[in-house]
Image (cartoon, grey):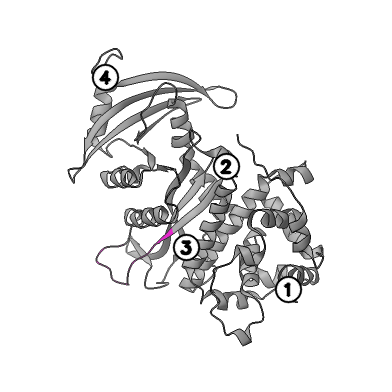
Amino acid sequence: MLQTVLQTIQHVFGSLGTLFRGVTDPRQAGKIRYPLPVLLFTGTWMFCCHLAARRQIHWRLRTAAGAVNMQALGGVATVPHGDTVERTFRRLNPEELQEVQCRAVERLIRQKMLAAYRLFDRSYRIAVDGSQVSTFEERHCAHCLTRTQDGKTTFYHHVLEAKVVAPNGFAISIMSEFIANPGEHPTKQDCELKAFDRLAKRLKARFPRLPICLTLDGLYACGRVFDLCRKFRWRYLIVLKEGDIPFLDQEFHSLSAMEPKSHLAPRDRITHQAGQDGTIRQDLTWVNEINYRDSHKRTHTVSVLECIETTSRRKTYRWVTDFRITKKNAPLVANGAGRIRWKIENEGFNTQKNGGFDLEHAYSKNENAEKIYYFLMQLAHLIEQLVAKGSLLKQRFPKGFGSVKNLAASLLEAWRHVRLAADTWAQLAKIRIQLRFDSS
């Protein structure tokens, strides 16, 4: 198990020095006991093994076999203590750790490992959503967001995530934007829409040529987001709830009620059987070429797509998009771009909160170190997905592990008891493998 994970890391990212290159070491050269890649690997490994707390590094990783393994992987005699990791993380630059994550995803894209999951064989589906990552009864830092209910004020930290999502369950963080107040007493709190503006500009600057289709929730159904996507040449599909944009509601309801043969009704509808066994009925209705004028006098030409899904109960979904909907592409737009947005909630945030990563646990009381741990968690989650969904694991363990939690537990036990050879990295680099993923 241990070799499978390390071989996946070596195959995709290279050695530890390659994976964490570009991160500046702030320590004095003569006082360094553990190289920086070793400390960053220790933090990442803590999440890979689902240790759930920094102190567990001492109790679970610092075994006799663990010391041999760290010597083989990092050239040091022991696994660093969690406090040693913490002291260094407080001084690192979070932007450099963000770049490590961006470079990891860029590597997957350039190796065409994600090519099979593009929408219409072109656009990478990126879901953007916010999540609360920690809560405090007292102010944690000057940048805490605040919420007051029934006279009680809660302090919390929030992050806006952009994740590459795919039908096979991939939810891979490509960029993060922390939502934070500029000081203790701001006139207005930071919010998701402000953070989205910052995130979008950074994403475009870092991946200027990447074809992107954004899939967003109803918060982003507004002219400023439409305009930004048009400016950056991104496609989009955004949840449209009743009342979000009254003009679009009125246009959709009035035009969709017309006879389909009418030249005044640029709409159509089909019935689609979805699900693995085709038992889910979807009635898809759409209206193209709606001219919407926002509050800033900007005109946008959009389409509205509605999906009424019938199983044991009836559900209605509606989106606004810049795609021109046709009978041929309507099912894929609805299911492959609209419904897939839930991957960021389920396979993304829910997995990180309840699947062993303990996203809402405060791994540090230091604001800077907290961000470093967050980025390493995203990297560990990426590694876990590559291993769990990759062909290498299925070849070596055809019966699987039953769950990702069991996989992490097996990895921890392997680290605690299996002793790696001194030339492990060199040997892994010589082995040629093909790593394939389920494209369903």
The residue at which mark 1 appears reads as 75
Image marks 3 and 2: residues in contact by CB distance under 8 Å: no
Mark 1, secondary structure of its residue? loop
Q: CA distance from mark 3 to mark 2?
A: 25 Å
Please state which amino acid type lies under the numbered disc 3.
Answer: Ser
Is residue 401 visible in the rendered image? The answer is: no
Residue 196 in the image: above or below residue 370: above
Q: Could you give the CA–CA distance between mark 4 and mark 1, rounded to whole angstroms?
A: 70 Å
- For residue 48, which quarter of the picture? bottom right
Image depth: mark 3 or mark 4 in front: 4
Residue named by callout 2:
169
Q: Nearer the viewer, mark 2 or mark 4?
A: 4
Other residues around mark 3 within 10 Å, as few (<14) / some (14–19) / many (≥20): some
Could you say which is closer to the camera, residue 72 or residue 111?
111
- Front disc: 1 or 2: 1
* Disc nearer the start of the sequence (1/2): 1
Q: What residue would you read off at disc 3?
A: 134
Residue at the disc numbered 4: 265
Which of discs 3 and 2 lies nearer the camera? The answer is 2
Magenta segment range?
Answer: 177-189
Q: Is residue 130 above or below residue 123?
A: below
Residue at position x 26%, y 22% in the image: 255
Disc on the earlier residue, 1 or 3: 1
Question: Label 1 to label 2, Cα distance in Å?
Answer: 36 Å
